[in-house]
Amino acid sequence: MGRPPCCDKNGVKKGPWTPEEDIILVSYIQEHGPGNWRAVPTNTGLLRCSKSCRLRWTNYLRPGIKRGNFTDQEEKLIIRLQALLGNRWAAIASYLPERTDNDIKNYWNTHLKKKVRKPETGSDCPKSSGQSSHRSVSKGQWERCLQTDINMAKRALCEASSASCSFGSKPSTYASNTENISRLLQGWMKGSPKPSVAPASSGSGVAESASSQGSVSTSNCIMSLEPLESVFGFNDSTAERWEAGAPFSLLESWLLDEHDGHGQESFLDVALLDTCELF
DNA sequence: AACTACGCCAACCGCATCACC
DNA sequence: AGGTGATGCGGTTGGCGTAGT
């Protein structure tokens, strides 16, 4: 018995979001906060299903998202987390508050999967090391570890992103985000009237476009300029807090460790077992 | 210059899980 | 406790851009 679709397919727009739609969505969320996605299309008049709105917000419009240009450290972190957690992209993304699960998933599938497979000369491969470590732990134990790990990640995320994600208490975050989008759109409108995909596929998208100047008003809000750092709720100080206050010291130190994958297998085993013992 | 193949990424789909009644 | 709706998550796809021929 199939569940009814989240929206009737008739009259629901699909495909790339237009800047206008982005403005409407951001304005609405700025006013009401995220959540109750079901109500978003009806209240905004957007011809999108609730799911599409949520996805657009979480993967693109949400404040604090960094796009493109994964750093070496992020890369290593993803590789190790993937070895540890498997394809649990949401869990992995919770260790990288500036990245979305979709982004990480795409990056893994297009870049890292090959990269990891390439030096498949033996135990150095993080993937295989992860699998071997899985074998060394009983299934139940592994499941517990995983659950524990996800919980830790969630806590870390809360710690890390409290500045950028506490929507109710920090409306300025919304404003910043809207400014960001508006600048993007302004640039987009001033420039060549490209198809709607342009801002979304322009590499760093929102972040890059944030450098354009000026202010713009939307249907229900006026935006002004701010330095880039304040545009995103997530900045260096947040990162510092994350590093300083994260509650998963051993696992974290392993994940963020700079050494280049040597001795990963043993370390992973230790990390896994210790994590289990800790909680 | 035209065509083809491939890579990348935003967005969609469907199942799983959560939350509320 | 069970049913139902809302949301989360991971896999997959479609379309655009670009490199190669």
Image: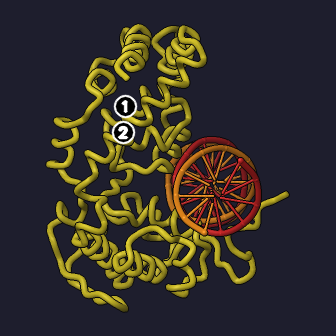
Chain colours: A yellow, B orange, C red
Residue A237 placement, left or right of B6: left
Q: As shown in the figure, which amino acid type bears the numbered disc 2? A: Tyr
Q: Secondary structure at mark 2?
A: helix
Residue A8 placement, left or right of A34: right
**Image quarter of the N terminus of chain A:** bottom right
Residue A256 placement, left or right of A103: left
Number of residues whose C-alpha sits closer than 10 Å to that of mark 2, classed few (under 14), some (14–19) or many (20 or more)? many
* Chain letter for mark 2: A
Q: Quadrant of residue A139?
A: top right
What residue is at 42 percent from the left and 43 percent from the top?
A: A93
Q: As shown in the figure, which amino acid type bears the numbered disc 1? A: Leu
What residue is at 25 percent from the left and 87 percent from the top?
A: A222
Q: Position of residue A213 (x, y in %)?
A: 20, 78
Mark 2 sits on what residue?
Answer: A95
The front one of A241 and A82 is A241
Number of residues whose C-alpha sits closer than 10 Å to that of mark 1, classed few (under 14), some (14–19) or many (20 or more)? many
Determine whether label 1 and label 2 are within 8 Å by CB: yes
The front one of A15 and B1 is A15
Q: In the image, which disc is placed on residue A77?
A: 1
Q: Position of residue A91 (x, y in %)?
A: 46, 39
The front one of A23 and A37 is A37
What residue is at 29 percent from the left and 21 percent from the top?
A: A250
Looking at the image, residue B8 lies above or below residue A20:
above
Looking at the image, residue A102 lies above or below residue A132:
below
Looking at the image, residue C6 lies above or below residue A241:
below
Q: Position of residue A186 (x, y in %)?
A: 32, 82
Q: Quadrant of residue A177?
A: bottom left
Between tags 1 and 2, which lies in front? Answer: 2
